[in-house]
Amino acid sequence: MTLAELLPSVGACGEPPLEEDLWPAGTGFAAGGDLLFAGVAMTQLAARFGTPCQLLDENEVRRRARAFQAALPEAEIAFAGKALPCRAVFRWLSAEGLSVDVCSAGELACALSAGVPAERILFHGNVKTAEDLKAAVSAGVGRIVLDSFDEIEQLGALAIAQPVLIRVIPDVDAHTHPAITTGTAGQKFGFPLGSVPRAVERVLAHPGLRLAGLHCHIGSQVRSVAAYEEAARRMSRLLRALPVRVEQLDLGGGFAAPYLPGERPFDLAGFVQRIRAAVNYECARPPKLTLEPGRSIVANAGVTLYRVITVKPGFVAVDGGMSDNPRPALYGARYTARLVGRHTRAKRRTMTVVGRHCEAGDILAADVQLPEDIHAGDLLAVPVTGAYHHALASNYNLVGRPPLIGVRDGEARTLVRRETEEDLLRRDVG
């Protein structure tokens, strides 16, 4: 049974409800306090693959990709590969008709090896090394997003008729965390508004470059539809003022995902309505739009399983931590967690789920409600871990990175295997 079908019975058995907006749509309750993830019990997944273990619901990823396409069918939807760079995910989304944007030669290699057509790849990044640019040109990527005057010259010396976009800082406040704000003045990304005419002039002067359009990205975890609307207006005016006609306007991504109970999904319908209106008003002949969702496609398709190792007053310590999720330490990201695998009628109290690493800031979920009888050996599930977990994972304390497990219709398979001690030592040749 699905989550929605089972919710009415939750209160009767004493289990806390699942927040529908946080968990994949196929999540449901099973016997003994277990949860079903895409048709497989989480306790079974933990037993088979070990913990920590990152789970990904393939159907949920595909469903969310289709939602973007249905909302704006005239636009190109390009998955922001940095959110979850994984061949299986790139393959799923390419099959759904999405393009992929990448930010390094490594992400490019991942996309190409997954079978993503080179012409449907956008190459981003505020720093592209000579190796990055050579790889992009050699592969024949569809577009390279130019970020600086130096890069114009560097790429111009390498390329032949390479389609490019110019990244613009639209000076729009996305009202998000400073560490993931990218559209205001003073950022390391792109060209300030006043520099755009000169950047266009330089691109047009290079026979190896072909100006395809403009690009902007105002930030990440953005909830404000009004901020996107203002960015669309400013970018459309810039496009209209160019000395040549270009066909493409890439408005980037950054669409927020709900992480905590009570948070709502991004208002995609409202976004589409206001973006369409803004662009159509500003441009007599509207450009081809591109959107770059990442988090909003994969975040809520993911759940991470942890094993409780020890319990102290106010703290539940698990076998993972900031090596598999540094987001709380990086910018104060907040998560919830729930006990999986046994029923309990114990009272709930406020506790903080912490990791195994040698940092006081190694916190996975602060101030969450957990049963007071929680103990070593219990299984915890943390939702909304599909984006920027696998991508940001590290080997701090020489801890191996967890596996990424794809689950679909009751079948689970390893997408990225667990890292071993042999893996960790292979590069150490001293």
Image (cartoon, rainbow, N blue to C red):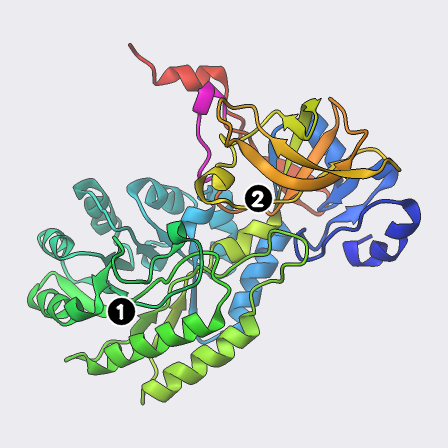
For this view, does 124 lie left or right of residue 414? left
347 or 264: nearer the viewer = 347
Rendered location of residue 124, percent (x, y) = 30, 53
Q: For the image shown, how many numbered marks are present on the structure? A: 2
Question: Which quarter of the rendering shows the C terminus?
Answer: top left
* Quarter holding residue 203: bottom left
* Rendered residue at 45%/76% (across/down): 74
In the rendered image, which residue does mark 2 sit on? 385
Crowd around label 1: few <14 · some 14–19 · many ≥20 (10 Å)? many
* Rendered residue at 51%/40% (across/down): 328
For this view, does 378 lie left or right of residue 304? right
* Quarter holding residue 395: top left
For this view, does 374 lie left or right of residue 106? right
Q: CA distance from mark 1 to mark 2?
A: 32 Å
Q: Amino acid at mark 1?
A: Leu
- SS state under label 1: strand
* Rendered residue at 30%/74% (across/down): 235
Residue 116 visible here: no
In the rendered image, which residue does mark 1 sit on? 214
* Rendered residue at 87%/57% (across/down): 8
Crowd around label 2: few <14 · some 14–19 · many ≥20 (10 Å)? many
Work out whether mark 1 precedes mark 2 in sequence or the reverse, and give the earlier one: 1
Q: Please, is residue 9 above or below residue 209 in the view?
A: above
Rendered location of residue 19, percent (x, y) = 72, 54
- SS state under label 2: loop
**Span shown in magenta:** 389-400
Please tell me whether residue 392 belongs to the stretch shown in magenta. yes
Q: Please, is residue 229 above or below residue 157 in the view?
A: below
| Whether label 1 touches label 2, CB < 8 Å | no
Dominant SS of magenta comes to loop
Rendered location of residue 372, percent (x, y) = 79, 32
Q: Please, is residue 349 above or below residue 155 in the view?
A: above
